[in-house]
Each structure stands twice: as C-alpha cells, then as structure tokens.
Image: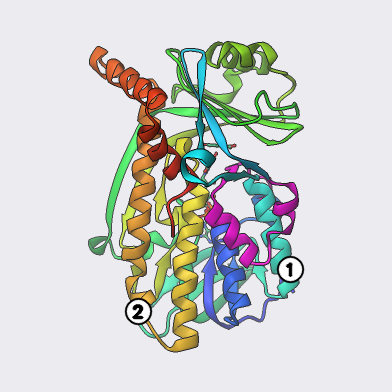
C-alpha cells in the first residue's frame, strides 16, 4: 500500500515518519483510528540514521503495545546499572537495587525498522519523499495538509494533525509566532560519535568525566559498539581519524577499560551539537506537536527518544478517548500534561550535561562544584537514587 496516491481524507494526519510518528500511527491504528503518515525522506534514509540507544521501561511497554516489540524483546539488552567515571576511575550506579527498575539497550535504527514493519503489516500508508508540506486551518474544525507527492499537489483532509516532524519540521512553525514561547540553551561543544563493529569495552555504559572532556562508551550489541567524545564545536569529522578517536577515548575512560578496549575501523562517524530546547504550547487547535518537533535535549541523559515516546503516550490516549468516548479532556490537557514531563527530562539532561562536561568558560569554583557533586554521587545512596530514578525514566 506504500506509495498509494489517492488518499484524500483520514482521521489523524501524521507529519513525520520517525519514531514518534510511526509509534503514534501504530497505537492509533490498533485502537481503530485511521492515520496517514507523510515523510520527507525515503525509508532507506530514515533507517540509516544512527541515533539513540537506550530505552526506558515505558518506551519498551509502548512498543509492545504497538505490536512492534517482538524483536526488541529477543535482541535488546536489559541494563540494571551504569558506570560513572571521574579522572579515569569508575563507580557504578545500580538502578535495580536503588529503584527496582532497569533500561533496555536497543538502537533507534532497529526500533524504527520494527515500527515500519508493523506499519506495513497494518496496510496503512507512509507516503515518502513528500515535499512542500503546509498545514492549513489547524485552528478550525476542518484542518488539512497540502503537499507535493510524486510530482502532484495533494490535499489531505483530517480531524487532527500530529506534528511528529522533528526539530527542523514545518509543524512548530505553523503555530502563530505570538502564541509560541521558546526556551533554549545551546552548549559550547558537540559529541563526536562513532559506530564500530567491535565488542563493547564494558557490559554496561560508561559516562566519563575527564579534564580533557566527556566520553561515553555505549553499545548496540555484543559485536557493535558506540562511543562518543566531547569535542569543540569547530571540529569536523575529517579532523578525526579513527586512530585519533581511539587514542583520545583511551585517555578519558577508566584505566582498566582503556587497557581492554578493542579498536577497529569505524563504520559511522558524525558530530552532533548539543542543545536544550522547549516550545510551548504543544497544541494549537487541532495541531499537536510530538517529540523533537517540540523539544530537544542534549543526549547525556539518553532522553530524546524516550521523551518522544512519552508524548506519543499522552497523545494516543487523548485521541483514543476522543474517538471512543467522545471525551476531549485528554486533548485539551495534552500540552500541559506532556510539558510537565518534558521539563523534568530537560532538567535531568541539563544536569547530566553540566555534571560531566568541561565548559570553556568554567571557573575554578565551577570545577570544584562539579568535583563535589561527583564525590557526593559516589558516596550517597540518596544522590544515586535520584540519578537512577530519572535515568530509568519518570512515570508517564
Ligand atoms: P525524528 O527522529 O527527527 O523524526 C522526524 C521525522 O520527520 C524525520 O524522519 C524527518 O525526515 C521527518 N520530517 C521532517 N520534516 C518533515 C516535513 N516537512 N514533512 C514530512 N516529514 C518531515 N537521543 C538519544 O537519546 N541518544 C542519542 O544518542 C541521540 N543521538 C542523536 C543524534 C542526532 C544527530 C539527532 C538529530 C538526534 C539524536 N537523539 C538522540 C535524539 C533522538 O534521536 C530523537 O529525540 C528522536 O529521533 C526523536 O524522534 P522524533 O520522531 O520526534 O523525531
Ligand atoms: C547511544 O548509545 O547512542 C547513547 C547512549 C546513551 C546516551 C546517549 C547515546 O546517553
């Protein structure tokens, strides 16, 4: 059914075929609500993006509910803790003991693939490579989307529009500027990430604070590792040979890990800038913002994808309540409800970023505060519990 051109009307039009749009589409379809998803890129392009890797239990639950959890249950890895490292020495935060919870390591690429397969099975369309997407009459009872698809101008009428089109999409900008409030912090560094077909250096993630800058050791599976280094914003990927990357990573992580690190050729290398951003409100009339379209977190707390999932949770419940019970309470409170959780995840992501990175303008006092915070974390079960509770994910 992919590629069908005669779609004129649907109940919920979803802009963006990333994790938020696909997950929302599945939850609504399963609840008997018709959806059409339009996506700017090709499916291959969407599936080639290497992004997040850590899923909260709530996200895992939603994927199962969407009928897309089978491979994740088979191939994902449960992590009951993580390591923090300071100046080449690590200590462990035990999520399970402190909170009873855990996270699942399963790549966003895999999750997106599973959601596309579930969508295929539902028979409902994703229109790829759409252009010139425009939202119309979102503040009226009959919103519609105009776009170009396979060289033809299309009009899609709908009851509601879900703007799941990421940070650079069109949805957020369709809300009148005088109604939109934006909150932003841009960080003075980026993350250089590599994907490497080598065994991970550790059975759990290592978040390392070091005077040379932050480093993170993550993974996708026992044969695929993901590593990151804090780098200046001016750096380019071309400046970083694989050799230079591995040498720098070894300097920043615990000595024992550095000694056992297996290196190899990188199969992906990219630099991502770090940003905190929230747009309010997340609803305008019949348009809802969901995921990165409404907010961005720096990746240090592993929250980006999980926040997209919690927005989808609230929005899918709200829309199902509307169609099944003719009750609009969820729709009317969506923005407020979603934002309350968004701001908590923004806080945690900002806290982790501030805790673990070196900032160019940092004073001696700031450095001592960072050291004291890390010392406190190492010695206090209360502090560790607060970190663990946020990392595994606050309840929906
Ligand atoms: P997206 O994944 O951005 O999906 C939006 C979709 O909408 C895209 O497919 C896009 O092509 C499409 N689109 C855009 N404009 C239009 C339009 N006009 N019409 C139709 N479709 C459109 N999070 C972590 O937790 N850990 C990480 O390591 C991590 N790394 C990241 C690296 C990068 C480079 C980026 C950009 C993000 C990263 N994130 C990470 C964040 C995480 O990947 C996102 O939070 C997550 O992808 C959000 O899902 P989404 O569906 O809201 O947005
Ligand atoms: C990843 O594996 O890509 C990853 C894991 C944890 C983070 C960020 C990224 O905090």
Q: What's drawn in magenta, residue-wise?
A: 47-76
- Residue at (40%, 56%) from the top-left corner? 294
Q: CA distance from mark 2 to mark 1?
A: 32 Å
Figure check: 75 above or below 175: above
Labelled disc at residue 91? none
Figure check: 115 above or below 200: below
* Residue 275 visible (yes or no): no
Q: Is residue 8 magenta?
A: no
Figure check: 154 above or below 235: below
Q: Residue furthest bottom?
A: 326
Figure check: 286 above or below 249: below
Task: State which quarter of the image contains the N terminus.
Answer: bottom right
The residue beneath circle 1 is 120
- Residue at (60%, 82%) from the top-left corner? 32
Q: Position of residue 144 (x, y in %)?
A: 47, 78
The residue beneath circle 2 is 329
Residue 77: image quadrant is top right
Q: Position of residue 254 (x, y in %)?
A: 56, 15
Viewer-side label of 2, 1: 2
Does label 2 or label 1 sit earlier along the sequence?
1
- Horizontal side, residue 76 vs residue 36: left or right: right
Helix, strand or loop at mark 1: helix
- Residue at (43%, 44%) from the top-left corner? 389
């Amino acid at each position: 059914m992919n590629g069908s051109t005669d779609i004129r009307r649907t109940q919920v039009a979803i802009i963006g075929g990333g994790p938020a749009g696909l997950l929302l589409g599945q939850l609504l379809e399963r609840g008997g609500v018709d959806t059409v998803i339009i996506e700017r890129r090709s499916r291959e392009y969407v599936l080639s993006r290497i992004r997040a890797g850590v899923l909260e239990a709530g996200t895992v639950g939603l994927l199962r509910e969407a009928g897309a959890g089978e491979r994740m249950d088979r191939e994902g890895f449960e992590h009951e803790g993580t390591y923090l490292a300071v100046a080449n020495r690590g200590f462990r935060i035990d999520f399970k003991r402190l909170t009873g919870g855990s996270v699942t390591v399963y790549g966003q690429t895999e999750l997106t693939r599973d959601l596309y397969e579930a969508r295929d099975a539902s028979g409902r369309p994703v229109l790829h490579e759409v252009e010139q997407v425009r939202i119309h009459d979102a503040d009226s009872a009959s919103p519609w989307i105009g776009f170009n698809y396979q060289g033809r101008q299309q009009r899609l009428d709908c009851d509601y529009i879900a703007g799941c089109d990421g940070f650079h999409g069109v949805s957020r900008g369709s809300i009148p500027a005088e109604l939109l409030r934006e909150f932003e912090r841009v960080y003075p560094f980026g993350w250089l990430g590599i994907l490497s077909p080598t065994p991970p250096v550790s059975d759990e993630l290592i978040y390392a604070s070091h005077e040379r800058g932050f480093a993170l050791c993550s993974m996708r599976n026992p044969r695929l590792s993901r590593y990151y280094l804090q780098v200046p914003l001016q750096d380019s990927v071309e400046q970083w040979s694989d050799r230079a990357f591995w040498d720098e990573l070894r300097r920043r992580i615990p000595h024992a890990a550095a000694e056992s690190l297996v290196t190899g050729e990188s199969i992906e290398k990219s630099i991502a800038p770090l940003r905190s951003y929230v747009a309010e409100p997340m609803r305008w009339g019949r348009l809802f913002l969901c995921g990165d379209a409404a907010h961005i977190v720096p990746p240090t707390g592993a929250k980006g994808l999980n926040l997209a999932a919690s927005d989808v949770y609230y929005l899918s419940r709200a829309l199902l309540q509307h169609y099944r019970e003719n009750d609009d309470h969820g729709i009317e409170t969506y923005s407020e409800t979603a934002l309350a959780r968004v701001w908590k995840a923004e806080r945690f992501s900002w806290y982790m970023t501030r805790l673990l990175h070196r900032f160019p303008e940092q004073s001696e006092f700031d450095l001592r505060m960072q050291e004291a915070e890390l010392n406190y974390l190492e010695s206090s079960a209360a502090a560790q519990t607060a970190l663990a509770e946020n990392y595994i994910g606050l309840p929906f």
